[in-house]
Amino acid sequence: LYSWSPLCYINMKMVPVPDQAFGNFFEGDCYIVLYGSSNSMDVHYWIGNSSSQDEQGAAAILVTQLDEFLGGSPVQHREVQAAESSKFRSYFRNGLIYKKGGVDSGFRHVESNVYKILRLLHIKGRKHVTATEVEVSWSSFNSGDVFLLDMGKVIVQWNGPQSNRSEKLKAMLLAQDVRDRERGGRAQIGVVEGGDEEDSPELMKIMRAVLGQRSGKLKEAEPDDTPDRHQQTANIRLYNVSDESGKLVVQEVAMQPLTQDLLHSTECYIVDQGGSSVLVWKGKEASIEERRSALGRAVGFIKAKNYSSSTNVEVMAEGGESAMFKHLFISWTEKGQTKGLGNVYTTGKIAKVEQVKFDVMELYARPELAAQQRMVDDASGQVQIWRIEDLELRELHPSSFGQFYGGDCYLVLYTYKRASKLQYILYMWQGRHATQDEITSCAYQAVAMDNKYSGVPVQVRVVMGKEPRHFLAIFKGKLIIFESGVTNPGPGARLFQVRGTHEMNTRATEVPARSSSLNTNDVFLLKTDHTIYLWYGKGCSGDEREMAKAVADVLSRQDKQVVMEGQEPAEFWVALGGKAPYACDKRLQKEETPHSPRLFECSNQTGRFRMTEVEDLTQEDLDQDDVMLLDTWEEIFLWIGRSANEYETKEACNSALEYLRTHPAGRDPDTPIISVKQGYEPLTFTGWFNAWDPQKWSVSRSGTPAITARGKTGLSTSHSSSCFIPATPGAPRTGEYLGPELLINKSPNELPKGVDPNRREDYLSDVDLENLLGCSRSGFQRLPRWRQNDLKKKAGLF
């Protein structure tokens, strides 16, 4: 099993869904989605609005059977169409697509390179996007939303006059995802601004050919559906669930604030969050029947309470509690947890997963072990790796295996045998700074290689920093990710952050070679011209130190020098450009904090404080249009994006106070609240994020550009923005940016007057520059000149 795998339930059978159809859901069916991370596993069953009661009941039974097959460790989730949990939606970063029909309509999941398609998708949502198939007619359009007219080889994005920047950008990402994943990169995307349709005559001609001439005015904007699922409530109740009398008995035990000692291992409990969600906790010593019927009883509880049928349900086993569940209690202590700076250990089958030594024969004999470990084998199979160069494949020599560059894309073909039959996994690794052309070419080459092997390979898209366990295991703890083109302050100095405790989970990521990049919780390797320093933070473990030594041997044969935190020689700080503060909060030294940090998108626009949780927090989740709340339990951070709504910004502190006041665990209202502005994040904030990039926003010029289309030149795979509005009075320049069509593939005498032909990128908006070159303006400026010229040539700007 890999990162996640959906199965569709039709005709009372489980039918696997092809990779290229992930994120597409037929309204007449039920689905099961299995998702695995390094510490936990989640099983979701999704209910389409048009699915039958029989299908829904049978899917619930299969989820229970799957849970038993996996040893009871996964967290089970019940998901209802259009009311999915934020965790479920986070798996599909580019959005969900709801498709009409199901088994009764003889559906087929979309296949790569199928162009006989005509559909209209109605896009809704800012943070989590959904796309619903609607009638292909002008009557389906309205002035406030974004629509995608998908004609197979051509996708036209129509932006309603009242739609906002975030909605347009999310719709474009979804259109690109459809193009790359479903069409193998062989489709064109055009953008039409609904308020300026005359600026896109060719695209409007295509739309009218399909939709006919529009008569009358567009419908008014439809209000977004904003359910109260994420609204905190003070009405938290704990119920005991028992079947001692032979029938279901639900008895109230306590109201908030809840304490952990209320939970007993011999019982099952329901935590009711005032109808916004229902959480079921299964004690490890509860009867088999009680554990087996937990999900069904939660659904029965919802009906008995007359709650909405879309109420979110989570079922978890003792020892595998979710972060949200733990946050409902005043305090949460793992059994065996030591005080002070000691390690934290969890109990039960879930915690034991990390310690299992792999025996490939045992994996084959026990599929449940393979599922728990997210491993198809012991990662000792054959490996071939290609890098995308000039949009073509270039095979790498084995001596460079495990060394990846953030500015490139790679294909990794893994071959192994099962039952004497060859099996294949094709990993598509995308560097953080790879261009859009390289990412598209990678997807295209993956399709070609898949065809070469008759469609047998399992394709896995891997984003830099999100590598699954099996991918890490292939390189036996020696995976090194270089930050391509980063300028280091010291001559030849390079700094690598090492995370991992064994060969199956270790990676080294290059970070800026400066003191502020250090973190007391980790091991760092500082490579200079003459020496490699192994810096051991006070919070790192012995296993982490051993893995760092192995990585150091790969980096260089130079002399190694161990440096303990607090005992650094002067030469160490000189190589980092001088000593400076870094993340050294003692709380970060714990292997696992009692309460995991949680990140939320905040909104106060409706008059009530609302939150949308962001799963698996990364720096990329911080959206400049939002106010984000990071709860580390002992502190509350309010991160304010540059383009955040003015009202939300003013009310941010009140929102944080409201969050603490209404928190189910009875939080201390005097908990410190720290406001953080984008680009000025302190170390106490960035220390909670892995491989934080301090240059990501430091010289950003982005203001609040709107996405428009320059349709006079026909179709384009990029979109352009209007004018640049300086974010601060000290911005480098003001004025109107030029559209890409005026700069791309033009000879010097064809360029607009005053344009420097050698610096065409300076006349592009930040949005257009990133779309064309595949990196931010600041990232582009940090690249070496040859790399800049290479990117400009590929984009037609040279």
Image (cartoon, rainbow, N blue to C red):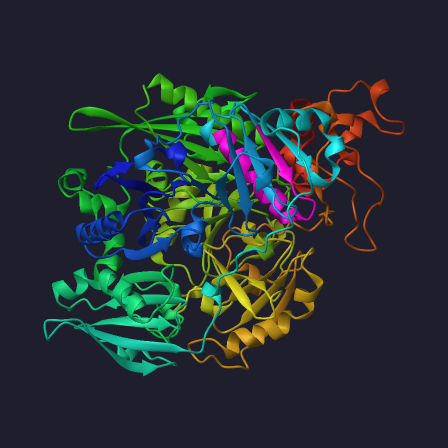
- Count numbered badges in the picture: 0
Q: Is residue 26 left or right of residue 391?
A: left
The answer to whether one can see residue 153 in this image is yes
Let me know if residue 168 is in the magenta part: yes
Which residue, as the protein is rendered here, is positioned at the far front?
216
The segment highlighted magenta reads 155-180
Quadrant location of the N terminus in the rendered image: top left
Farthest right residue in view: 753
Q: Position of 347 compared to 735: left or right?
A: left
The answer to whether any part of residue 1 appears in the image is no
Instruction: Name the spot of residue 211 as percent of width and height, x first.
Output: 60, 30
- Percent across and percent down for residue 205 are 67, 25
Residue at (33% x, 36% y) in the render: 474
Quadrant including the C terminus? top right
Residue at the spot x=30%, y=36% of the render?
Answer: 103
Residue 789 drawn at (x, y percent): 69, 26
Quarter where residue 456 is shown: top left
Q: Name the residue rendered at 27%, 55% in the picture.
A: 74
- The image quadrant of residue 6 is top left
Q: Is residue 22 above or below residue 701?
A: above
Left or right, 234 with respect to 603, comes to: left
Query: In the image, is residue 535 part of the stretch drawn in magenta?
Result: no
Q: Provide the major secondary structure of the magenta segment.
A: helix
Near-viewer residue (245 or 101): 101
Between 256 and 420, the one lying in front of the other is 256
Please state which of residues 54 and 662 is positioned toward the viewer in this rendering.
Answer: 54
